[in-house]
Image: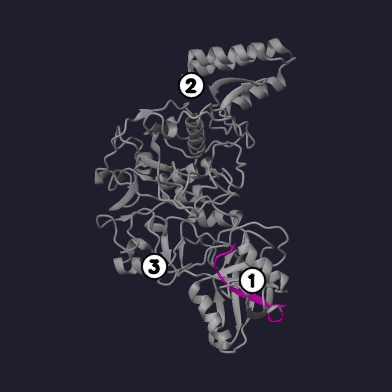
Amino acid sequence: MFSKGLLLGFFALAIPLLLVVLWVPEVQAGATVVVINGDRANEGFNDRTPAPATGGNTGLTVGEQRLIAFQHAANIWGATLDTNVTVKVQATFDPLPCSASSGVLGAAGTFFVIRDFSASAFPATWYHSALADKIVGSDLVPGAPDIVAFFNASLGSPGCLESSGWYYGLDNLAPSNRIDLIAVALHELGHGLGFANFVDESSGRNLAGFTDIYSRFTQDLSSGKTWDVMSDAERMASAINVRKVVWNGTQVTTALPTVLSPGTPFLQVNAPASITGRYPVGTAVFGPPLSSPGITADLALALDGGPVMTDGCSPLSNAAAVAGKIALIDRGTCTFTQKVLNAQSAGAVAVIVVDNVPGSPPPGLGGAAAGITIPAVRVSLADGALLKNQLSGGTPVNVTLGVDLTQFAGADPTAHALLFTPNPVQPGSSLSHWDPIASPNQLMEPAINSDLTHSVKAPQDLTLALLRDVGWTANPTPDLCPISIATPSVIIDGYDTRVPNILFSTGCTLSDFVQLIAANSRNHGDFESSVAGLVNTLRQAGLISEDQSGELKSAAARANLP
């Protein structure tokens, strides 16, 4: 999972680490993001373990590859936002809370919070440091980082998601058993830039008694109020108002129809009348998706011959009762896919898995297995108990599993994006993420998803739209290279120059320009002289060093091009 991990500067956070400012290529874009390496020698970003090149990342060690991947994420944000004040990010790899089945991948937040500065849109309102700097046009806390980010150094080690591990490639093609560091870094930087509130959701208390810019756009659908005008008690109740709290900013609302897909999943109980209504579900990543108008059938409690007769971990003993119906199965000791396969073999038309821990909304169902042909969902422990009580009393229960095509997945009926409001509160995750029911999956959901792109803006993602609502402006330069050469260094005719592949405000990289020169050169001499002209311009602008200039010219001279 992710965590917003707020770090507030005036709490005098002591970090007894040697801060080494890494040289990051000046990105000619709307923003410059500078990375500060907070790791000690031989750890984290300084890990000297040899590593093979992967996914366009040519770093020679684990530490180098981590830095290159993080820099790549920083450059994506730099090319997206518009500010003349450098955004400083202090980053480290450290052990974070983790177990064999779950763990925190990263945590990040603003280092300082600032209010009542000149040009702020709202008085008595906390802003994230980098955002306040952008609005004022100067560094309000010189010498201090704007964002502090931590990444889990234990990932893939014994006891910490040991079947997984980090993926440092730049190609957005992480294997199924690896976590894409760039996606996690983009997420955590999003929190530090402004995608987080400063409220203690467990108590509803504002930070030092003042609201924050994020809370001004957080609206409770039950009361109609935004969080900045609520009492502590109202915010405390709103934080667990499941799927009833939305973002009401105009930028997100405008972008939402171009990003999210129609089709909110649901469980509709049609009978008996005493429990009719719609219930939230978590969908499965395996098997066919829910559809419209959906599957309507009676429920049947699945029974098997195992130690727990209702967990579906063994072939079902009441196949005749389940056939043609929607099987109701308790979460238990086997995988979700095994439960569904057993129910499918018994003739079930769909499966509802009842959670075994309290909380709402119900999470999705993970796993992968071939041959699953029926849909499956999860319901909360409380809703599952309600359904089972009816069945145990002999009352037939008829339901429909489907999607509502009139409502965007991840939005309320009026097309406002849903914020994550689980019950009970999840400190570090509640409110400062999108609801995970969003489809397609969004960067700022509380847990990582394997289908995330490296985009932070529409039509793929809503993150930039939210940051624009709180006060950021987007880099106005159009992306002239939507499909760029994104290698970390410039490679000419197979030779790695080790010169950083600068990303420009046009959305083009230095490698893109080299390729363009090659495509339009009449002969080798023309190519060599044109590359030299480009390199001289970059050198004069201070974007590359003399040595790097020499490397690029030498590679161009050696290139086997006509």
Q: Which region is colored magenta?
A: 320-335
Say the numbered circle drawn on residue 238: 3
Q: Label 3, label 1: how many angstroms apart (C-alpha)?
A: 31 Å
What residue appears at the point 36 percent right and 69 percent down from the top-left corner? 237
Colour scheme:
one colour
Q: Amino acid at mark 3?
A: Ser
Residue matched to label 2: 543
Residue 291 visible (yes or no): no
Residue 425 visible (yes or no): yes
Quadrant the C terminus occupies = top right
Look at the numbered disc 1 and give the secondary structure of its residue. strand
Look at the numbered disc 3 and give the secondary structure of its residue. helix
Where residue 352 appears, x then y in whole percent?
60, 72
The answer to whether residue 444 is left or right of residue 365 is left
Q: Is residue 82 magenta?
A: no
Look at the numbered disc 2 and give the secondary structure of its residue. loop
Q: Is residue 303 above or below residue 291?
A: below
The crowding category of the residue bearing disc 1, from other C-alpha atoms within 10 Å (few below 14, some 14 to 19, many at least 20), is many
Q: Amino acid at mark 2?
A: Leu
What residue appears at the point 52 percent right and 16 percent down from the top-left corner? 548
Q: Is residue 454 above or below residue 102?
A: above
Work out whether residue 250 or residue 445 is closer to the camera in this orientation and state it.
445
Work out whether residue 388 or residue 408 is closer to the camera in this orientation and state it.
388
Where residue 504 appears, x then y in whole percent?
54, 30
